[in-house]
DNA sequence: GTTGCAAATGAGAATCATTATCATTTAAGC
DNA sequence: GCTTAAATGATAATGATTCTCATTTGCAAC
């Protein structure tokens, strides 16, 4: 738990219990993308006494510090993901909410070229494909 | 105004005053992407007596009918755009909110291939590049 | 190890965009 | 023109997120 402690310090954040616990939930969850409410529920179930407001506050701080990425998918609520991996885009099943990731270097390169040709400097981008996944457990099948 | 009337009928919607007026605002605005609140304000200023709830209701119906596309950019509110043009993606300036459009057939094709290779059928996709535009009137300059 | 104090927290109120409710009005076939 | 189901406007309700503020806590200096 010391390395997490350090991560927070480097981000200019004091190493408090709620922040350490939220990091732990993000690291230990089998799902990579979690909503604020889901994280809150996981903490409550684990016996931690945190407030929902704290979860939102901390996630926003983590985002500002670059520890976490916030996604606004079409569901209307934000989901968060640890920012310790390479960049990737998403494909989301509209039926069951399943999220998969992909990277396509050709797409990346074309995006850079499009921004350049229009005089934009890229800060970020979001590519989300929405569809139906046809898995075993997808309610749409 | 008769052709609009027809558009609505074909979409299975009665040609009511609010619906015709909202269509008119979308067609006549110099901005292609409008929020519900902006459309509401435009109507009020034009002297129309509509409720905000009606604007939301009608836009949702238009979306279902394929007359309009809803985008969820990072701003937290939805923006709407007439769906009478070819598909395109967006590049958005984070400083001034400017929205430009683009199409890249190579990107489109790679997306289709990615979905196929993962067993997804594509319903839709959203590609938004966020950056800084460096225009004359962009506050960031 | 105590102490002091700014930073962080929890609980709940507040906000913002959007949706639901419901009594009233209206489009459009007869 | 009349009827009736569909549509509307006003407003209450909702869901996600943010704010407020009294209380608690991390941690640096003693």
Image (tube, coloured by chain):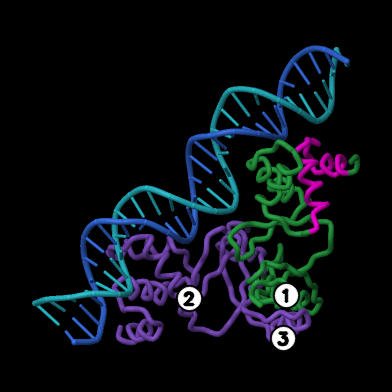
Chain colours: A green, B purple, C blue, D cyan
Q: Position of residue B94 (x, y in %)?
A: 62, 60
Q: In this image, B68 relative to A81: left or right? A: left
Q: Residues within 10 Å of mark 1 (few under 14, many from 20)?
A: many
Q: CA distance from mark 2 to mark 1?
A: 30 Å
In the image, the segment drawn in magenta is: A4-30
Query: What label does residue B137 carry, if any?
Result: none
Give coordinates of residue B17: x percent, y percent: 29, 73
User: In which quarter of the view is residue C20 placed?
Assistant: bottom left
Q: Is residue A137 left or right of residue C15?
A: right
Circles 1, 3 touching at the beta carbon (< 8 Å) = no
The residues tagged by marks 2 and 3 sit, at their Cα atoms, a distance apart of 26 Å
Q: Chain of mark 3?
A: B
- Rendered residue at 84%/60% (across/down): A85
Q: Nearer the viewer, residue D7 or B36?
A: D7
Determine whether, in the image, residue B70 is placed left or right of residue A89: left
Closest to the camera, between mark 1 and mark 3, is 3
Instruction: Tell whether B37 sits left or right of B101.
Output: left
Residue A19 lies in the magenta-colored region: yes
Q: Which mark is residue A111?
A: 1
* A26 in magenta: yes
User: Which residue is under mark 3?
Assistant: B109
Dominant SS of magenta comes to: helix
| Residue A15 visible to an observer of this rendering | yes
Instruction: For mark 2, name the chain.
Output: B
Q: Is residue A128 visible?
A: no
Label 2: how many residues lie within 10 Å, few (<14), some (14-19) or many (20+)?
A: few
Please tell me which of labels 2 and 3 falls first in the chain.
2
| Quarter of the rendering containing residue A101 | bottom right
- Which residue matches tag 2? B64
Above or below, comparing residue B9 to residue B48 in the picture? below
Q: Secondary structure at mark 1?
A: helix
Mark 3: few, some, or many residues within 10 Å (few <14, many ≥20)?
few
């Amino acid at each position: 738990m010391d390395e997490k402690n350090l991560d927070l310090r480097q981000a200019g954040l004091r190493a408090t219990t709620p922040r350490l616990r939220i990091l732990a939930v993000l690291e230990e969850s089998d799902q990579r993308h979690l909503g604020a409410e889901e994280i809150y529920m996981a903490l409550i179930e684990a016996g931690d006494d945190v407030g929902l407001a704290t979860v939102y506050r901390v996630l926003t701080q983590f985002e500002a510090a670059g520890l976490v990425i916030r996604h606004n998918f079409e569901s209307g609520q934000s989901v968060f993901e640890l920012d310790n991996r390479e960049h990737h885009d998403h494909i989301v099943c509209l039926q069951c909410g399943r999220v998969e990731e992909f990277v396509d270097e050709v797409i990346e390169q074309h995006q850079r070229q499009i921004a350049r040709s229009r005089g934009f400097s890229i800060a970020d981008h979001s590519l989300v494909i929405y569809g139906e996944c046809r898995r075993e457990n997808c309610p749409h099948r």
